[in-house]
Image (spheres, helix red, strand yellow):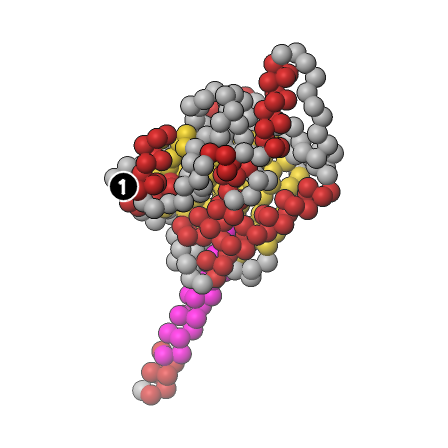
Amino acid sequence: MLNRLLVVASLAVFAVTASAADAARKTMLVIHGGAGTITRANLTPEMEKEYRVKLEESLRAGHAVLAKGGSSLDAVEAAVRVMEDSPLFNAGKGAVFTHEGRNELDAAIMDGRTKAAGSIAGVTIIRNPITAARAVMEKSPHVMMIGRGAEMFATKMGLEIVDPSYFWTERRWKSLQNILVKEEGLKPEASAAFPEDKKFGTVGAVAVDKNGNLAAATSTGGMTNKQIGRVGDVPIIGAGTYAENESCAVSATGHGEYFIRWTVAHDIAALVKYKGMSVKEAGDEVIHRKLAPVKGEGGVIIVDRHGNFATPFNSSGMYRGWIGADGVPHVAIYKE
């Protein structure tokens, strides 16, 4: 009898240990920093190094949360905030300019466990839009808030507010001026350091935590020379951002008008959920076989609750990276 009890106890300990190991193995964080015309020919070695360093910093920030047993929501917010605070990416500090010379920011976040979501659009004074989107999700009865109303809400919630000049960068200003000059039929100023803005510089993160809960977060400054008040796919749940535990978490970057009309993020999740596709199969189906033929350029990052992930894109490059439970960051930029 005693031997039998010892065997049962041993099996129970083994089961708990195996379960913990399984949970640790499936934690995963995947990020992107924009897709578009990104090639070795138009990105200098110095700039490539800067991007790789910042992408790794974003990965490590999110992984630090997951490694301590934190939630996927906390992880994706931490990862996105790093990129929002960098002038390298078209989100937060590095946002592009509208036709009128303003920086208008959009962001969204979604909890795969509850399907709660929050988003903001057209804000100009919130330092970290992704944190404001989370505040909308957790501290208001709404999903989306825009413009002045979103800014007033963020101020009331005690989020960091900055002067609009905080988002001004010479690089993005020159990009706008080059496009305005082209509209006049003149030759724009050349820039060897950066690819010219046929690039969709959204940033985003998706993650699964030790409990198998998914989350997605996306943030952007939109498209250079966009009309004032234009809103893309990022803050639209199901278009540029989506997460549910039953399928996967998705964050998109690309030509937003296409991603809205093709409901890209939800379409990928639906293929996983209802057709039993893997995240790679679902991502390839939407990005390569649905969007590419209609010239819908861009890409997505996807992860499921088992830690399987994919990063399909149909442009020449996409800043992207991933980090698992081992804590080793992986970064890629070009088509390999």
The residue lying furthest to the bottom in this view is 2
Q: Residue at x 57, y 40 (%)?
A: 87
Q: Residue at x 64, y 41 (%)?
A: 333
Question: Where are the magenta residues, as a range?
Answer: 9-29
Would residue 45 be visible to someone looking at this image?
Answer: yes
The residue lying furthest to the top in this view is 185
Query: Residue 322: x percent and y percent?
Result: 56, 50
Q: Quadrant of the C terminus?
A: top right
Mark 1: amino acid: Ser
Q: Which residue is mark 1?
A: 140
Would residue 307 be visible to someone looking at this image?
Answer: no
Q: Quadrant of residue 163?
A: top left
Near-viewer residue (98 or 210): 98
Q: In the displayed structure, does residue 291 sit left or right of residue 131?
A: right
Query: Residue 69: x percent and y percent?
Result: 42, 62
Q: In the displayed structure, does residue 83 sit left or right of residue 239?
A: right
